[in-house]
Image (cartoon, rainbow, N blue to C red):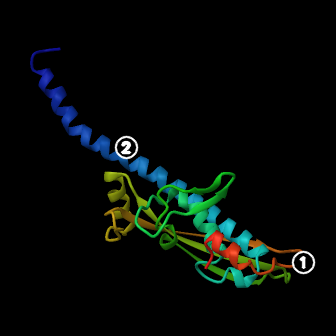
């Protein structure tokens, strides 16, 4: 290396490193966002499946069986610590608390529509809306800016992006829905 080249290599590194870090953080946040989008679709599927088998009085609106099914799926990617209590699941040793899921019920909302297809087959459609937190420091701000949601910030100062997914399931067979969930089971499942 010639005498004057060592300074130019350092200058090139200083100029390229911030751009490279921005690109890396953007790609990491984008991959988390794509995972959350897939999980939101799965939450809509689980909600639609719950709507097929449960009594309509049990899944009316947020707080019902469909909302609980969607929250259970999305609790793993919610990363929220503000709220009343973490989501719990029954397990062999009692209850399992999903870590960092305290605010999941406020991050998720569901819409349920029942109808008929063209061939008079009953169908249920569930839409799940999820306020996805953008946790990667620089990448989250870039994605929030690109999506036009730069002003949406949660209680931690993290930017959020809304994700909406639908799932429709047909019911081509006749089944009797489960009876209403007993009060003690509703309390254990956290259903209002």
Can residue 179 be seen from the camera position used here? yes
Q: Dots 1 and 2: beta carbons under 8 Å? A: no
**Residue that extends furthest to the right in the rendered view of this protein:** 174
Which corner quadrant holds the N terminus?
top left
Can residue 168 be seen from the camera position used here? no
Please indicate whether residue 123 sits to the left or right of residue 82 in the image: right
Look at 34% across and 68% down and name the residue there: 153
Which of the 4 image quadrants contains residue 175?
A: bottom right
- Packing grade of label 1 (10 A; few <14, some 14-19, many >=20) is few
Q: Nearer the viewer, mark 1 or mark 2?
A: 1
Please indicate whether residue 38 sits to the left or right of residue 14 in the image: right
Q: Which dot marks residue 24? A: 2
Q: What residue is disc 1 on? A: 174
Disc on the earlier residue, 1 or 2? 2
Dot 2: element: helix
Q: Position of residue 8 (x, y in %)?
A: 15, 27
Q: Position of residue 157 (x, y in %)?
A: 31, 63
Determine whether 127 is above or below 97 in the image.
below
């Amino acid at each position: 290396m010639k005498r004057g080249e060592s300074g130019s290599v350092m200058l090139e590194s200083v100029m390229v490193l911030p751009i490279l870090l921005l690109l890396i953080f953007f790609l990491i946040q984008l991959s988390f966002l794509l995972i959350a989008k897939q999980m939101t679709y799965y939450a809509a599927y689980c909600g639609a499946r719950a709507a097929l088998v449960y009594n309509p009085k049990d899944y009316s609106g947020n707080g019902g069986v469909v909302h609980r099914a969607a929250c259970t799926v999305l609790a793993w990617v919610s990363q929220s610590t503000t709220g009343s209590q973490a989501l719990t699941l029954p397990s062999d040793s009692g209850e399992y608390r999903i870590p960092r899921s305290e605010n999941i019920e406020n991050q998720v909302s569901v819409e349920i529509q029942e109808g008929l297809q063209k061939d008079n087959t009953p169908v249920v459609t569930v839409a799940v809306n999820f306020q996805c937190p953008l946790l990667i420091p620089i990448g989250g701000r870039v994605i929030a800016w690109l999506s036009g949601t730069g002003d949406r910030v949660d209680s931690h100062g993290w930017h959020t992006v809304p994700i909406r997914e639908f799932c429709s399931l047909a019911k081509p067979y006749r089944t009797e829905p489960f009876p209403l969930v007993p009060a003690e089971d509703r309390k254990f499942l956290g259903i209002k």
